[in-house]
């Protein structure tokens, strides 16, 4: 097998076109190509009058070659080797069932370790109903919502799987998702996504596989305490919803609670577990008509069925030292209510697999750090988030309607009185206003500068009727739970702070990879 990179293919190109180009690169007749499989596919839209695909393919031509082309190499088949170790006498515990906990539990189960999983939120089937009720009525379930429940916060985001991590385990994550029913294309697209509508089914199938391999999954069961003795984990105390708390012996605990488990952070702090403040970012969701974004990115090719809805990723560095960037961009998606605490409003974004909604949205974020939190307390970042969320809740009207402002009005510092051409997608509703009433000056002013600079990178980004919805405060964890050798807590042996909540990941893939790495350590006896 040979891997051939940088093959240019027209938007209307076929598999036969790809096969012929591969044969030409190998200098063999097309009928000698016995197999031609996509390994990577991306859109090249640098020239708006020549938008096309760039592909990498794995080819079997039935004979050995010694091509002199540096873009042709031998294709190494991917293989993930499960860690090997004896089943532990005391079963490992996984707390949290987002991407980190999900894949930690899967690896433990595949390695014969029969993990016990505790998740404070509901199973994904029930969770979907609870979230839908909140979006329709504003009735929030503080234990099972967009942040908490099977699959984690990423379940209601788009299921974006693009990542900056180069860890070989990322391929294992993609392959397990495909085995669980995710689209095959996530294995080769440069920016893969599963979609909020399809991800729950894949998550459920992975859960069922964990159980079939001897694992247990306990939903609606919240961690209350971590039991320790002589610097080692000895067990966990958990409480089922509506029931009484109980303890379970455990000498290996993976703590994968997610970036919004604030009560858990407070419990860890009370246990004097070493943790520190961590920089993160805050801002608002910016929403445009999808047609505007696709036209700006693809020119006359916008709307071509092979392309779908265009996305973007923008970043600028301001003279004040702040970074402003877009994050979690959702083509053809919607802005969603993502609160997890009463009286506090949070936004996020999501797309279904088809990405066929009328609007595009992305988080427009400003970097913040310990110098902004007003305190040296390890949880000062949490309180910083809460203050913003409380102001947004009040500004929206106190019933989870979100405060919104037209971009033109925001740039002019004039409160919006009505919505323009870009209609909001946020439910349960919005309140036109001025976002300066809920955002600190340094964040709002940085966003203004960022919008104007990003207009030079994406025409239409500062469109007068584009809409800002506040507040986006959960871009990443505001704390880091310190760990050392073997991925264990620096103070407590057998405790594995893991994933995004512990401050070691930033997205579905990186969190899942971190979960795999923690599971490997346990299987190998660390």
Image (spheres, grey):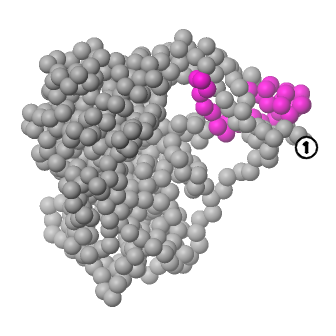
Horizontal side of 326 relative to 136 (left or right) equals right
Picture coordinates of residue 254, whole percent (x, y): 39, 68
Residue 30 forms part of the magenta stretch: yes
Quarter of the image that includes the N terminus: top right
Horizontal side of 395 relative to 385 (left or right) equals left
The reply to whether residue 166 is visible in this rendering is: yes
Residue drawn where x is 38% and y is 59% of the image: 503
The answer to which quarter of the image holds residue 330 is top left
Residue 23 forms part of the magenta stretch: yes
Horizontal side of 256 relative to 436 (left or right) equals right
User: In front here: 341 or 484?
Assistant: 484
Residue 477 in the image: above or below residue 50: below
Residue drawn where x is 88% and y is 40% of the image: 67
Region of the chain picked out in magenta, as a range: 18-46
Residue 456 in the image: above or below residue 165: above
Residue drawn where x is 42% and y is 28% of the image: 454
**Secondary element at tag 1:** loop
The answer to which quarter of the image holds residue 37 is top right
User: In front here: 324 or 70?
Assistant: 324
User: In front here: 76 or 216?
Assistant: 76
Disc 1 packing (10 Å; few <14; some 14–19; many ≥20): few
User: In front here: 484 or 12?
Assistant: 484
- Give the residue number, with chain letter if any, for mark 1: 66
Picture coordinates of residue 461, whole percent (x, y): 39, 23
Picture coordinates of residue 17, whole percent (x, y): 74, 22
């Amino acid at each position: 097998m040979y891997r051939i990179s940088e093959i240019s293919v027209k938007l209307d190109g076929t598999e036969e076109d790809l096969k012929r180009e591969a044969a030409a690169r190998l200098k063999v007749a097309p009928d000698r190509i016995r197999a031609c499989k996509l390994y990577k596919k991306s859109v090249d839209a640098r020239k708006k009058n020549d938008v096309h695909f760039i592909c990498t393919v794995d080819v079997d031509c039935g004979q050995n070659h010694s091509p002199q082309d540096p873009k042709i190499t031998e294709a190494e088949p991917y293989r993930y080797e499960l860690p090997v170790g004896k089943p532990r006498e005391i079963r490992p515990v996984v707390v949290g069932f987002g991407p980190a906990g999900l894949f930690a539990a899967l690896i433990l189960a595949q390695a014969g370790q029969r993990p016990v999983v505790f998740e404070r939120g509901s199973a994904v089937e029930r969770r979907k109903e609870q979230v839908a009720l909140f979006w329709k009525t504003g009735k929030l379930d503080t234990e099972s919502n967009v942040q908490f429940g099977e699959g984690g916060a990423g379940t209601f985001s788009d299921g974006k799987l693009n990542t900056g991590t180069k860890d070989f385990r990322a391929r294992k994550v993609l392959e397990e998702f495909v085995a669980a029913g995710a689209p095959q294309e996530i294995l080769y697209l440069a920016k893969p996504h599963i979609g909020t509508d399809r991800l729950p089914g894949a998550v459920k199938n992975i859960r069922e596989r964990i159980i079939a391999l001897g694992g247990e999954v306990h939903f609606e069961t919240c961690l209350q305490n971590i039991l320790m003795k002589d610097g080692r984990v000895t067990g966990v105390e958990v409480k089922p919803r509506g029931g009484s708390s109980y303890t379970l012996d455990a000498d290996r605990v993976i703590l994968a609670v997610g970036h919004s488990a604030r009560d858990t952070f407070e419990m860890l702090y009370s246990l004097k577990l070493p943790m520190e403040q961590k920089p993160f970012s805050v801002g608002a969701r910016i929403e445009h008509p999808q047609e505007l974004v696709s036209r700006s990115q693809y020119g006359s090719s916008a709307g071509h069925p092979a392309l779908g809805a265009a996305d973007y990723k923008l970043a600028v560095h301001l003279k004040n030292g702040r970074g402003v960037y877009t994050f979690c961009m959702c083509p053809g998606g919607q802005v969603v209510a993502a609160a997890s605490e009463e009286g506090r409003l949070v936004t996020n974004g999501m797309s279904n697999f088809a990405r066929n909604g009328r609007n595009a949205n992305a988080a427009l974020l400003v970097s913040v750090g310990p110098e902004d939190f007003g305190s040296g307390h390890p949880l000062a970042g949490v309180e910083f988030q809460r203050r913003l969320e409380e102001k947004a809740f009040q500004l929206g009207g106190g019933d989870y309607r979100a405060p919104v402002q037209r971009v033109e009005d925001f740039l002019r510092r004039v409160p919006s009185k009505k919505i323009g051409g870009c209609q909001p997608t946020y439910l349960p509703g919005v309140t036109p206003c001025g976002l300066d009433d809920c955002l600190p000056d340094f964040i709002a002013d940085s966003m203004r500068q960022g919008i104007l600079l990003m207009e030079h990178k994406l025409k239409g980004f500062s469109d007068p009727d584009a809409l800002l919805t506040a507040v986006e405060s959960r871009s990443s964890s505001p704390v880091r739970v310190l760990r050392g050798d073997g991925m264990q807590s620096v103070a407590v042996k057998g405790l594995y702070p893991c994933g995004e909540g512990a401050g070691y990941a930033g997205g579905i893939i990186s969190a899942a990879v971190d979960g795999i790495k923690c599971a490997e350590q346990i299987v190998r006896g660390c």
